[in-house]
Image (cartoon, rainbow, N blue to C red):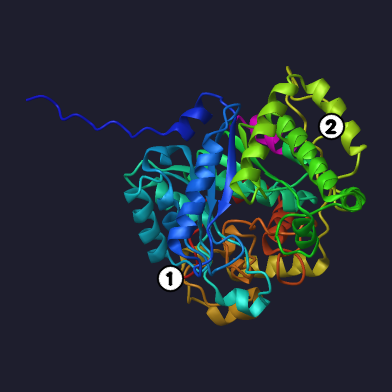
Amino acid sequence: MSDPVTPAAPANRFRDSLSNGEFVLLVESSSPSLSNDPIAAGERLAAFEEAVLSVSNVNTALAVTDRYLSLDAWRAVEYANALREENRDRHVIYLSGRNTTGEELRQLSDAAAKSRLFNVVPVSGNCVPGDTLRECRKRVFSESVGVIRNLAERKEPFFLGGTTNPYAYTPFTMMGQYFKLVKKLNAGASFVVAQAGWDMLKLQSLRWYFSGRSLFYPMIARLVLLTPNLVEKILAGEYPGINISPDFQKILEKELRYSLNQFEAAQYRRLELQAAGCRLLGFSGIQLAGAETPGRAKIAAERIGNALREFNSFDSWLEEYNSYLARAEMSPFTGSFYLYDHTLRRAYPDEEIPVARDFGEPEITPGEKFRFKLRRFLFPHADRQRAESRRLLKKLFASCRGCSSCRLPKTEFICTEGCPKRLPNGPCGGVKPHGNCEIAPGECVHSRIVRLAHWNGTLPALEDEILDSGRDD
């Protein structure tokens, strides 16, 4: 009897493009409000698909986002069913964990597999704009690390992406993002999407760090085509994790004094330069936000394709980039931390590994040291005991919130349930550049953990283990 034949994996042109080193452009289309007529919404997505796939000078597809700034929206999996079935292997869909239980995620994963939507980027999700801390704590946030692991363990050929926010400007906020990204890669992510921003030095640092560790994963940089309305919303903090530096704000304010056509032309040129720079820095593609109509998406894609051909050397691009931005400072505050010196002077050192800058001594108060030592003494094996063991002491000395899986010895004896989203594996993308929480006052819980780990000499261990959620969905 002959051996059974294993079915061939279905075609996946997005995965193959990244594997073959072909630069890709993903154009975002957000899932619409539930109040929209589903037929009209489907027609809009079909028009987007037709527009981007008609672009001939760059490999272009769609990225369908999920509950990005609203809960009152179609799920991306549902919305993406309007895509032509024969093209679905070219596109990417997002899967948000905000207000989504584990069972709901399983149902959405089943729906994605049934619709042959295998290119998936799970995200934990941001707080809804306008949420109070109390409201945010009441929401469910299924962390992307666990979702990636669960999807990777399924029999279907999911091709998974992991997001990160490279625009962190203290060493411990930055390393929190990097460590969490390593966990996503270890969980099964095969490509990376960097959160939106304008600091090319931070994008290069992201590439250098992971290349220096021989983690050669395709990286896609998220870029934004700005409009006056979008600038206003970003400055008002309505897009968590996306920030505009004071210098860049001055440039935009000057451009806003021009006519609308002149302002738009300036944004297109900036987008072209960013896109060409990303390719020259070694990124595998870009994901474009802000192109809100099919016509605008097609124009932006064609201009990006032209820019990729215009700049074929790093030096010629850098000269034009510096000239256009007048060497504006893209960091949000004085004294911002950059991991490497001499970034944006060369694409990548040919024969030497970049040497990371020293973090310096972390600022640890006597009170923090005392609390750490006390918790270590009281709860040295809490992760190997029943969660309810010594709960009163944990509540008094570690602000325990009564979760079902204690992780204190693995998180520098800081309870990650203090995070408003209750994320155990690292910071969300909404953390502010200086390390403060997206919604709660003060420092992000995970920035504190990284800072204490550096003081304690246990920094590398933070990326070693994927921690389970402390709740039962």
Instruction: Residue 412: tell me if it is visible.
Output: yes
Q: Residue at x 56, y 77 (%)?
A: 138
Decide: marks 2, 1 in contact (CB < 8 A)?
A: no
Q: Nearer the viewer, residue 469 or 61?
A: 61
Label 2 sits on what residue type?
Answer: Tyr
Q: CA distance from mark 2 to mark 1?
A: 50 Å
In percent of width and height, residue 378 lies at: 61, 71
Residue at which label 1 appears:
472
Residue 353 appears in which quarter of the rendering?
top right
Q: N-terminal of the two: label 2 or label 1?
A: 2
Q: Pointer 2: residues within 10 angstroms few (<14), some, or many (20+)?
A: some
Residue at which label 2 appears:
321
In percent of width and height, residue 376 lies at: 63, 65
Report the span colored magenta.
205-215
84 versus 81 height, above or below: above
In percent of width and height, residue 259 lies at: 87, 49
Q: Pointer 1: residues within 10 angstroms few (<14), some, or many (20+)?
A: few
